[in-house]
Image (spheres, rainbow, N blue to C red):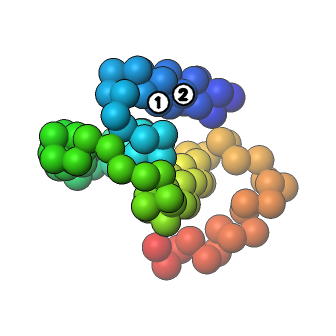
């Protein structure tokens, strides 16, 4: 199962960023890690995401978590959608009777 190692890497990065940047709020770190994985297959977007994160660290340092809740939810949905699309493209990764296959027809338009 590929999800377990990916989840461990995401948790490790989240912990590492939290320890490395103590002024950064948890939601900001979570958004950053999720979007890193979402953009991992698009090098230009990934590189821009890293740049944006570094600028954010430099400019703001930290703000309240609730300011980032909407962005955090959006990043979570984007990461889940990206992962689901990728899994559907790889034959045998999603079992035939998996509930996520019900939406497979809807994904043809993406």
Q: Nearer the viewer, residue 107 or 69?
A: 69
The residue at 34%/34% (across/down) is 23
Disc marking residue 11: 2
- Can you say whether 84 is above or below 70 in the image? above
Q: In which quadrant of the rendered image does the N terminus lie?
A: top right
Circles 2, 1 touching at the beta carbon (< 8 Å): yes
The residue at 58%/48% (across/down) is 87
Q: Residues within 10 Å of mark 2 (few under 14, many from 20)?
A: some
The residue at 61%/77% (across/down) is 106
Measured as percent of width and height from the top left, residue 31 is found at: 43, 48
Q: Nearer the viewer, residue 29 or 66?
A: 66
Measured as percent of width and height from the top left, residue 71 is found at: 44, 62
Q: Quadrant of residue 67?
A: bottom left
Whether residue 97 is visible here, answered yes or no, is yes
Q: Secondary structure at mark 1?
A: helix
Read off the residue under disc 1.
14
Q: Secondary structure at mark 2?
A: helix
Question: Is residue 16 shown left or right of residue 7?
Answer: left
Measured as percent of width and height from the top left, residue 14 is found at: 47, 30
Q: Distance from label 2 to label 1 (Cα)? A: 5 Å
Q: Residues within 10 Å of mark 1 (few under 14, many from 20)?
A: many
């Amino acid at each position: 199962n590929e999800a377990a190692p990916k989840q461990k890497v995401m948790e490790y990065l989240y912990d590492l960023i939290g320890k490395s940047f103590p002024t950064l709020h948890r939601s900001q770190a979570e958004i950053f890690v999720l979007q890193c994985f979402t953009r991992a297959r698009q090098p230009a977007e990934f590189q821009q995401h890293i740049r944006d994160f570094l600028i954010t660290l430099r400019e703001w340092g930290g703000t309240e978590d609730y300011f980032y809740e909407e962005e955090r939810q959006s990043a979570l949905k984007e990461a889940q959608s990206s992962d689901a699309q990728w899994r559907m493209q790889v034959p045998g990764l999603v079992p035939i009777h998996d509930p996520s296959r019900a939406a497979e027809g809807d994904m043809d338009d993406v």
